[in-house]
Amino acid sequence: MAIWTLFPLLSASLLLRLIWSLPPTNANSEGDALYALRRAVKDPNNVLQSWDPTLVDPCTWFHVTCDSDSRVTRLDLGNANLTGSLVPELGKLQRLQYLELYMNNLAGPIPNELGGLKSLLSLDLYHNNLTGSIPPSLSKLSNLKFLRLNSNRLTGRIPRQLTKLGNLKIFDVSDNDLCGTIPTMGSFSKLSEESFKNNPRLEGPELMGFVRYDIGGSCA
Ligand SMILES: *[C@@H]1O[C@H](CO)[C@@H](O)[C@H](O)[C@H]1NC(C)=O
Ligand SMILES: *[C@@H]1O[C@H](CO)[C@@H](O)[C@H](O)[C@H]1NC(C)=O
């Protein structure tokens, strides 16, 4: 108060400078990230009709859940008849805990940027048409409990870094086209062969101390 009255001009200019330097609010950038997904998919059942980008945040959009700070915690779009692809912008949802996009017909790769979802507990992309390899960046999702990528068209090796996901309870990559050996270290030591079945080119499980992970010919 005293400073305000003593130096009104200085204070006003400081205030203006502060306003101009503020980053956009998280709520808006999270809405933008979700809207990027809406633009990248076809939605014949109009499940995304309520996704209005002019609203101040996405918290009233159907299939989106927020916490008390208006930050997105859940995206529930399982079995929604979506086609199209995932978008890297989804990786900006820093408080997202549940990314549920199972049983759609999404094609293309799993964006590396999903490794930025540091609050994620559940990544469910099963029963889609995803291609490319499993991004090693998913090993950064240290809270992850459920990782279900089964029934897609994923190729390449299972990133060995995923074995350091200490909270992993369910891991399913069955029904894909993965190759290489099955890691058996860390959290993978508790998994059964069911998690890996129906990948005709997948060998293993690795015999610890006997078979080196990266041994063998090409695998892409
Ligand atoms: C999914 O969308 C297609 C159009 O792309 C439509 O023909 C079909 O009936 C929809 N399926 C369901 C279960 O709504
Ligand atoms: C999966 O995508 C391919 C093109 O990449 C397409 O030919 C195929 O029909 C899709 N599968 C399904 C089940 O839609």
Image: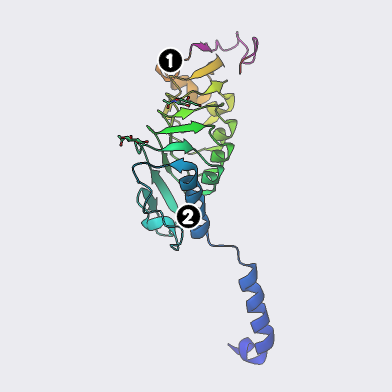
Mark 2, residue position = 31
Residue at x 37% of width, y 41% of height: 44
**Can the viewer see residue 94 in this picture?**
no
Whole-percent x and y of residue 129?
46, 28
Q: How crowded is mark 1: few (under 14 residues within 10 Å), some or many (20 or more)?
A: some
Within the magenta stretch, is there residue 213?
yes
Q: Which label sits on residue 197?
A: 1
- Disc 1 residue type (three-letter): Lys
Toward the viewer: 149 or 104?
Answer: 104
SS under mark 2: helix
Whole-percent x and y of residue 140?
56, 37
Which of discs 1 and 2 lies nearer the camera? The answer is: 2
Q: Is residue 146 left or right of residue 45?
A: right
- In the image, residue 7 sits, relative to residue 209, either above or below, namely below
- Contact between marks 1 and 2 (CB within 8 A): the answer is no
Q: What stretch is highlighted in magenta?
A: 200-218
- Disc 2 residue type (three-letter): Gly
Toward the viewer: 38 or 156?
Answer: 38
Type of secondary structure dominating the magenta stretch? loop
Toward the viewer: 220 or 137?
Answer: 220
* The residue at label 1 has a CB less than 8 Å from ligand 2: no
Q: How far apart are marks 1 and 2 (CA)?
A: 38 Å
Q: The N terminus lies in which quarter of the figure?
A: bottom right
Q: The C terminus lies in which quarter of the figure?
A: top right
Whole-percent x and y of residue 195?
42, 20
Q: Which residue lies furthest to the bottom in this view?
A: 5
Within the magenta stretch, is there residue 204?
yes
Q: Mark 1 or mark 2: which comes first in sequence?
A: 2
